[in-house]
Image: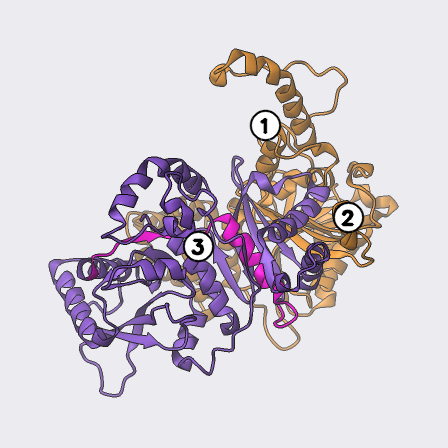
Amino acid sequence: MDDSARRLLQRIMRRIPAQMLKPTLDKWGRLTAAQRQSMDFTESKWALTEKLLAICEENEMTVKHITELEMIHVIENPDHCMWYALQLMDPEEDVHSVELTQFKEQFKSHLRELIRHVSIKIKKHTDEAVWIRIAWGDSFSRPNHLKPTYVVHHLQTPYVFVTSLTSKLKPLLSQALVLSTRYQAIKDASLSGRKLTAIRDLLMRQYQQVFPTKYPSPLAENDQNASNILINKEQAELAASRHQKAREAFGDGMLPQLQSAVYKLETKFRDHTNKTMTEREEAFRCVVKFASTNLLESLRHCASSGIASTPGTSLLSSIPLKGRNYFVITDNSPGPSSQTRQPSN
Amino acid sequence: MERLQSSVVRTPPNSTVVQRRSKSYRQSYRSCLGAPSRLGLTPGLTARRLNSSRRALKSHVITEKVNPEHLALLVKTEWRLSYVTPLHQFRHTQLKRYSRQLSAFIAAEKQQGVAMEVEGSQSGFRVSFSVVQGLAATDDDAETVLIQIYSTPVFARQDEPQKSVWSGWLTCINGNPEYLESLPKGFTCLPLFGGSGAEVLTSLVKSWFQRTFDCCFGPLEINHTSLQWLAALWTNCHTESNLQHLKMIWTLPVVPPLQVTYTVNPQDAWELWMSVRKDRLERTEEEAEAGSIDIEEVVRFVQGLKSHFYRHFRLDLSAGNLNQVSTTLGSAKSSGKIKISNSRYMITTLTLLTECALLKMPI
C-alpha cells in the first residue's frame, strides 16, 4: 500500500464519526470475517486507524479500494462540504432515452478524452441518483485523491450537484456532462448550500407545497395562547390569513434546510422623503445576506408573524419559487412575481 | 434602551437620596448634566441620554503624540468593554508598585488553584503598567493607563521576547467636565476599560482593581443608538479614509433566528449621508452648527438604509436588533466589543464610548 493510500485512509478515518465506523466498514465489505472480528470498536479511533492500516496492508489494498470506502461515507453523509447546483439546458431529442449504462460509458470516455489522468468512479445510489467521484491529475501527475470532486446527477432531471471544483476544471466537467446527458449547455443555477438534501429538495420541489385557493379552509388554531379572548377574536382572522400566505409562499411542514441566501442589489434609491437621493442617476449598491440554521423556516415565520408583509410578491419568496439562493437584482430585471420555473419532467 | 428608560422612571424617588449625599460624596453623573435639576426633585429627564449632538469626527493625527508601540497595540486588537466607577487613591506615579502588586496577586491566585488556561502552566506572569501619553483630550481627563501581562516561561533564555498574553487599558477621553470637577479629592475617573486576552486574567485584573481602589466594574454594551452614531460618524469619514464598505448585522426574532448582513457600497452610503446632512444644513443657517452632527441626521441616515431594504424585501429591520456595525475604520458589536482600526479616529470613537461608560455607571 503506497503512501498516498495510507494518507487517504487516515483522512477518511478522521472524518468518519466513531459510531458510523462499524456500519461503514461492513458496507465496504472488503474485510474478511476474521479481520472484522479483530477490530474492537470500543478502542480509540487512533488505535482503530492503526489496526485498519495493518489489515489493508495484509490484504494488499490499493488506492482504488480506499476510495470506495470514502465514497460510501460521503454518500451516507453528504452534508460536510459545500454543494453547488448546476442546470443542464436545451435538451436534444433523445434526452429521454439516456439510461444508466449509456451515461456511465459516455461520461467516462468523454472525460478521459478531455484530461488524460483522471480517476472516475460511478455508483448508482438507491434513490435514482448517480454519484460520481473524480480525482483529477494533469498531463504530468497522477490523480490527486486527496481533493476529489463529487458529482450527483439525477437521471431524467436536468439537475447536477457538484462539490469543490476549481475554475480550471469546471469547463472539462461541464463538457463531459453535457455530452453524456444529451443536452446542449449547462449553467450555474445560483444555488449553493451545505446540505445536499436541502438544495435538492428545494430545486426539485420535493417538499410540501401549498397552492393558493380562493376559499382556504380555516386553520385550526391551537389554544395555548388564548390569553385574551377578545384580542384573539380580532386577530384570529388576520393571523390565519397571514399563516396561509406564509404557507403559500414558502411551503408547509418540514422545509429544506437552506442556510443562506445572498442578494446583490443594484437598484436606484427611491424614497419620497429624500429628494436628493431619489434624483440620483446611479444605482445604490449593496449586498444583503440572510443566514439562519434553517433559512426557509425563518422566512416563513417572518411572514406568518407579520414582520414581513406581502410575502408572496417579495424577493424572499423567489428563493423557493426559483430554487436559487444567489440573486442579482437590477432595475431592469423583471419582478419576482412574474416568473415561474418550467416544470421538470 | 430599556434599561435607560426604566431607570429614568426610578430616579425620582432616588434623587432626593442622591441630593443629600451629594455634599460629601461624589455627585451623581446624571444630576450634573441637568444643572437646575439639582435643586428640584425632578431629575434631569432630558439629560439622561447621550449627547444629542456632537462634533463631527475629526481626524486627530495622534501618531506623533502617542508612543507608536502603544498605538499599534490599541489599533490591532478587539477589546471587550466595561465601565469603571472612579478609582480611589490611584496615583499615576505609583505604576511600578502596582505592577508588582498585581503580579503577586495573580501568582497568589494561581497557587490557590484558580485555573489558568494560558499555555505553559509552569510559567509565571509579569505585569507592566504604563501611561499612554497623548490620548487625553482635555485637562480634566486623566491619563490613559495601559496594562500588559507577559508570560514568563520557567526556562526562558535571556533574550527571548516575552509573550504578551493579556492587555487592557483604562481611559477617559473628553469626559464631562462638570462631573469630573465634582469628584471629591482622591478620586481618579477612568470610566472606560477595555481588555483583551484570557477571561480568567481579565477577572483577576478587575478583582485586584476592585480591592485596591474600591471601584466597581460592569459590562458595557453598545446600544443601538451608539451603534447608529458610529455608523454615521464612520461614514462621514469616507472622503478622508476609504471605508471599503459599511456593514451592519441585524438579528430578527423569528424561529430559528434570522441574521441579516447588510453591506453598503461606501460611496453610495456617503452620498446618502451627505444628502441627509444637506437637508438639515439648508434649514439651519448658522455656520457654527456646520461642524456638529445631530442625532436626527443619524436617525434619518439609518432610516434611509432601512427603507431601501424594505422596498425590496418587505421586511422592517426595526423589528430586529442591530448587533454589529463595521467598516475598515473599526467594528463595534452590541455585546460590548470594539475594534478601532485607524488611529486617526481613535479620539472621537473613545469620546463616544467614554460617554456611554459614564452614563452606564450606577452612581
Name which quarter of the figure residue A234 lies in. Answer: top right
Name which quarter of the figure residue B150 lies in. Answer: bottom left
Residue A270, numbered circle: 2
Residue nearer the viewer, B4 or B245:
B4
Q: Is residue B24 above or below residue B94?
A: above
Indicate the colour of chain B: purple
Mark 3 → mark 2, Cα distance in angstroms: 51 Å
- SS label for mark 2: loop
Looking at the image, residue B134 sits to the left or right of residue B265; the answer is: left
Residue B118 visible in the shown view: yes
Q: Nearer the viewer, mark 3 or mark 2?
A: 2
Circle 3/circle 2 CB separation < 8 Å: no
- SS label for mark 3: helix
Q: Is residue A212 above or below residue A186?
A: above
Q: What span is colored magenta in the figure?
A: B213-242
Dot 1 alpha-carbon crowd within 10 angstroms: few under 14, some 14 to 19, many 20 or more: few
Q: Please give the letter of the chain rendered in orange.
A: A
Residue A15, numbered circle: 3
Q: Earlier in the sequence, mark 3 or mark 2?
A: 3
Residue A50 visible in the shown view: no
The residue that label 1 is drawn on is A253
Looking at the image, residue A28 sits to the left or right of residue A53; the answer is: right
A310 falls in the magenta region: no
Looking at the image, residue B75 sits to the left or right of residue B90; the answer is: right
